[in-house]
Amino acid sequence: MTVRISGALSDFVAANVSENGSYENISEYVRDLIRRDKERAELEAFDRLKGELTLAFAAPEASYKPLTAPEVIARNRA
């Protein structure tokens, strides 16, 4: 995989990858950025799910309706 970076972004990367920077090489820096982005995306997904569950558990029990597994799968595909 090849990534080209120029200008201000290149300068920023160079400042973070050096003897005084936080990373020993560019690959280490990129892997860390990807890991952090993955963690952020997973946290956002978890927070969305938590919000949906909070709303579901707050709903009155009378509003619940029984569904079969195929009905749930079909609803979630729509």
Image (spheres, helix red, strand yellow):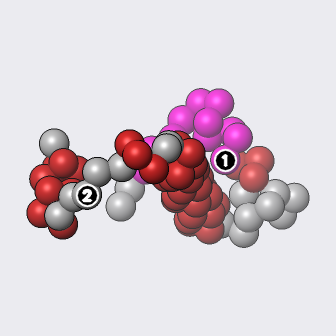
What residue span does the magenta drawing correspond to?
3-13
Across and down, in percent, residue 8 comes to 65, 30
Left or right: residue 14 versus residue 3 is right
Q: Quadrant of residue 10?
A: top right
Q: Earlier in the sequence, mark 2 or mark 1?
A: 1
Q: Position of residue 6 (x, y in %)?
A: 54, 35
Mark 1, secondary structure of its residue:
helix
Residue picked out by circle 2: 66
Residue topped by disc 1:
13
Magenta span contains residue 67: no
Q: Amino acid at mark 1?
A: Val
Comparing 34 with 46, the one in front is 46
Residue at horizontal 38%, vertical 56%?
A: 2
The residue at 62%/63% (across/down) is 32
Q: Quadrant of the N terminus?
A: bottom left
Task: Give how far across and how far down residue 5 sits, in percent.
Answer: 51, 41
34 in relation to 54, above or below: below
Which residue is found at the position 53% from the left and 52% from the top? 57
